[in-house]
């Protein structure tokens, strides 16, 4: 096995579920009633467009959060949740009727607390209506890699709470659940993320990416067909951790809002207009009037929306023309350049990973994926070139940075589910 390669996932989901059920029994003295499952994601293209009313094109990946759940312990206070992280061997207790932020030592539970709070805020599920729960949590979504481990945890939590409340899976409005989980991250955890991560975790489709209009929440599954074209979807974790709430993410959002407000005022459009409502010609028309930083942020978002729609058009057209696949790859490269130069959210290590991939034959396209400031790249690679990619990209990266990047070959999977 090559340098820095992430070991193939040898444990099947069935084996993983059986181990989780057994661990739950050892911790709590009974088997769980059900297991809630939600996937992480990788975004093919469409970065930082989601909170600007634009288009995104993510894939739900075969790395998941699993949450084994049973009702509360006998004699426990009404609303008590006892939650254990199997991965970190940490335990916390809180109450659904008093949803305060966790102390620092239990910070990892804020996503669970926040979802319960947000479901109440949106009128979907009153926390006081639940008697409480015992939860054992396990995840194989790499944390700090920009693969949405937090959104997967949020969706798994929301589905678990609905199941505890007696809602059948068919009665759960998935887009509304995604919105509630976004509110949890925005209003409770404190990261102003857009809707993409929660939406794809809740609504992902097998062997497909979702084109999501983040304003209307209209979406459609677009088959990838990578296997038929002998292509692999590969993510590489730079080993530079990514964290929304400790990065410049909120600052970028504010700069986008500043640019949209300026454009709306200049062109006489509604005050609540977003960057999605403007084209590149309109932006260039105010280049000498809009402050340089908001201008660059807006240029990234507006051109990224156009790239995303073009990439979807090429996929849906089946790469009918011989040059279409190369054009698709160039769109990914242009996306990275825009994130690097206009949105300024890449770091040198991630730039290096992308450049190493660009220089390798058999790589169709490569770019940073996720919120930025570390995390992962996403790469579309010819199957025959995967071994070269593994050896040359990861080895050269380690030689230049001293960091051990991890490589993951992903499949597109369905969104969150309840497993009885």
Image (cartoon, helix red, strand yellow):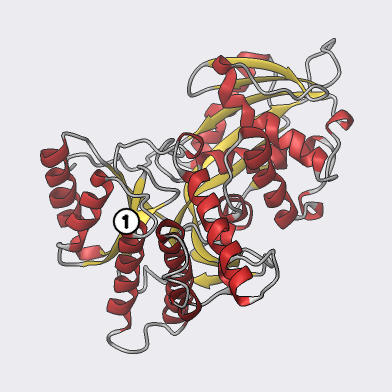
Label 1 neighbour load within 10 Å: few <14, some 14-19, many 20+: many
Residue 240 quadrant: top left
Q: Is 210 situated above or below 64?
A: below
Q: What percent of the width, then of the height, locates residue 93?
A: 69, 15
Q: Quadrant of the C terminus?
A: top right
Residue 72 quadrant: top right
Q: Closer to the camera, 204 or 227?
A: 204
The residue that appears at 67% across and 51% down in the rendered structure is 178
Whether residue 295 is visible to the viewer of this picture, yes or no, is yes
Q: Is 393 situated above or below 9?
A: below
The residue that appears at 37% across and 49% down in the rendered structure is 345
Tell whether 236 sits left or right of 123: left
Q: What percent of the width, then of the height, locates residue 280?
A: 46, 77
Q: Is 201 situated above or below 105?
A: below
Tell whether 48 sits left or right of 328: right
Q: Residue furthest right?
A: 129
Tell whether 8 sits left or right of 83: left
Q: Quadrant of the N terminus?
A: top left
Q: Residue furthest top?
A: 75
Q: What percent of the width, then of the height, locates residue 393?
A: 17, 51
Q: Closer to the camera, 211 or 48?
A: 48
Q: Is 363 situated above or below 89?
A: below
Residue placed under numbered mark 1 in the picture: 340
The residue that appears at 30% across and 37% down in the rendered structure is 239
């Amino acid at each position: 096995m090559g340098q820095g390669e992430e070991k193939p996932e040898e444990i099947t989901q069935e084996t993983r579920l059986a181990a989780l059920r057994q661990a739950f029994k050892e911790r709590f003295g009974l088997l769980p009633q059900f297991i809630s499952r939600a996937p992480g994601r990788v975004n093919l293209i469409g970065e930082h467009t989601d909170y600007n009313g634009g288009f995104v094109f993510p894939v739900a990946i075969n790395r998941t959060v699993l949450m084994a759940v049973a009702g509360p312990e006998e004699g426990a206070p009404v609303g008590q949740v006892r939650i254990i992280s199997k991965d970190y061997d940490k335990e916390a207790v809180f109450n659904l009727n008093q949803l305060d932020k966790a102390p620092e030592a239990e910070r990892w539970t804020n996503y669970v607390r926040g979802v319960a709070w947000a479901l109440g805020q949106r009128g979907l599920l009153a926390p006081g209506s639940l008697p409480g729960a015992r939860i054992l949590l396990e995840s194989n979504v790499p944390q700090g890699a920009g693969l949405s481990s937090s959104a997967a945890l949020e969706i798994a939590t929301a589905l678990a709470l609905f199941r505890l409340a007696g809602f059948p899976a068919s009665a759960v409005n998935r887009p509304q659940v995604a919105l509630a989980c976004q509110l949890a991250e925005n209003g409770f955890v404190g990261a102003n993320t857009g809707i993409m991560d929660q939406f794809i975790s809740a609504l992902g489709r097998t062997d497909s990416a979702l084109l999501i209009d983040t304003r209307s929440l209209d979406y459609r599954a677009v088959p990838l067909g990578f296997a038929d074209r002998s292509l692999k979807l590969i993510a590489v974790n730079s080993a530079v951790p990514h964290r929304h709430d400790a990065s410049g993410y909120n600052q970028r959002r504010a700069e986008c809002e500043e640019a949209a407000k300026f454009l709306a005022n200049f062109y006489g459009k509604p005050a609540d207009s977003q960057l999605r409502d403007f084209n590149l010609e309109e932006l260039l028309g105010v280049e000498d009037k809009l402050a340089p930083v908001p201008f660059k942020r807006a240029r990234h978002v507006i051109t990224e929306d156009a790239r995303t729609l073009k990439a979807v058009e090429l996929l849906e057209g089946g790469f009918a023309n011989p040059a279409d696949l190369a054009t698709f790859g160039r769109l990914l490269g242009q996306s990275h350049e825009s994130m690097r130069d206009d949105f300024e959210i890449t770091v040198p290590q991630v730039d290096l990973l992308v450049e190493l991939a660009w220089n390798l034959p058999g790589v169709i396209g490569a770019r940073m994926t996720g919120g930025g400031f570390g995390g992962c790249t996403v790469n579309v690679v010819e199957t025959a070139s995967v071994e070269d990619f593994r050896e040359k990209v990861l080895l050269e990266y380690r030689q230049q940075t001293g960091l051990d990047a991890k490589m993951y070959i992903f499949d597109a999977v369905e969104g969150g589910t309840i497993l009885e």
